[in-house]
Image (cartoon, rainbow, N blue to C red):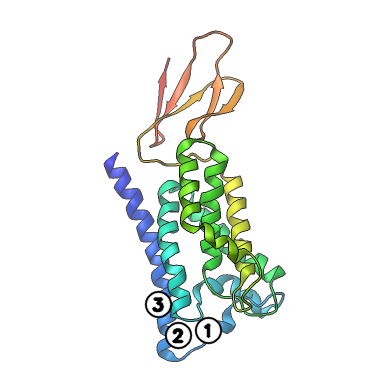
């Protein structure tokens, strides 16, 4: 179990820091070579601006802009890869491209840059994912995320004309949709708890998001115990 935990943690740190390193490398090259990569951001409803769906999250206006995204990316990214390690890359993929595409559709006529849409997307996924699972551990994650970054809700509304609130809003929507789509995926707690899967027709959701079935009208049950490492043990 400890070996599995270390592997999951290392994987989360590796992927998160690799992406952040890429952001800082792009900014360092831009600064050292005197480039202005802002024109590679998302410019809504133009063919050239559609390239920004891929490149915009990698580009930041200045060091402060990049730093303001770096810290939450570390915290939320590692959290995402720990609690949802088997689907984390897929979640990031959908948040990255869905939020960018939606900004390209509805955004103001300006260049939209920065990884804040991804930050808001991961934040929304962790928050709503915890609420949808309705068990104490997942709800605790939602509350922690809310208390740490709840003030970011103000970024969802128009304010500073130099801030892309559209990216924040579309990232949040993408994260919420991912939370709904993956709502049946069990959360990883690292405690080695087992998930009970009851075999029959009356279905209800139990702890850790497992699907439980009552066996029949008798008090005896036949069930499978599914452990966190996905091994299956038959028991009666």
Question: Whole-Å distance between the Cαs marked 2 and 1?
Answer: 7 Å
Report if the CB atoms under discs 2 and 1 are less than 8 Å apart: yes
Query: Label 2, label 3: how many angstroms apart (C-alpha)?
Result: 8 Å
Depth check: give the residue in front, 100 or 167: 167
**Which residue is under mark 1?**
37
Is residue 18 depicted above or below 150 in this figure? below
Q: Position of residue 32 (x, y in %)?
A: 40, 89
Query: Number of numbered discs present?
Result: 3
Q: Which residue is mark 3?
A: 25
User: In percent of the image, x 38 and y 55: which residue is there?
Assistant: 12
**Mark 2 — residue?**
30
Label 1 packing within 10 angstroms: few (<14), some (14-19), many (20+): some
Q: Can residue 65 be seen at all in this image of the molecule?
A: yes
**Residue 184, visible in the rendered structure:** no
Q: Does dot 1 land on a helix, a strand or a loop?
A: helix
Residue 26, given in percent of the width and then of the height, sits at 44, 78
The picture places residue 89, in percent across and down from the top left corner, at 48, 55
Q: Residue at x 61, y 21 (%)?
A: 202
Which of disc 1 and disc 2 is earlier in sequence?
2
**In the displayed structure image, the side of residue 183 where residue 192 appears, left or right:** left
In the rendered image of this protein, does residue 89 appear above or below residue 159?
A: above
């Amino acid at each position: 179990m400890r070996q599995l935990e270390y592997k999951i943690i290392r994987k989360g740190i590796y992927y998160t820091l690799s992406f952040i390193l890429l952001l800082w490398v792009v900014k360092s090259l831009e600064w050292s070579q005197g480039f202005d990569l802002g024109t590679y951001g998302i410019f809504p409803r133009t063919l050239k601006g559609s390239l920004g769906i891929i490149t915009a999250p990698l580009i930041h206006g200045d060091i402060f802009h990049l730093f303001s995204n770096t810290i939450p990316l570390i915290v939320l990214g590692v959290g995402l890869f720990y609690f949802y390690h088997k689907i984390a890359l897929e979640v990031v993929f959908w948040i990255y491209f869905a939020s960018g595409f939606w900004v390209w559709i509805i955004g103001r006529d300006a260049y939209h840059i920065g990884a804040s849409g991804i930050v808001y997307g991961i934040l929304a996924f962790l928050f709503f994912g915890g609420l949808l699972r309705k068990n104490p551990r997942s709800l605790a994650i939602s509350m922690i995320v809310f208390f740490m970054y709840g003030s970011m809700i103000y970024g969802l509304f128009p304010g500073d004309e130099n801030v892309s609130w559209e990216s924040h809003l579309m990232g949040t929507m993408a994260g919420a949709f991912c939370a709904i789509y993956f709502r049946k995926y069990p959360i990883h707690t690292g405690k080695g708890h087992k998930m009970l899967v009851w075999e029959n027709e009356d279905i209800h959701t139990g702890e850790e998001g497992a699907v439980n079935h009552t066996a029949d009208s008798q008090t005896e049950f036949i069930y499978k115990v599914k452990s966190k490492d996905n091994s299956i043990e038959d028991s009666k």
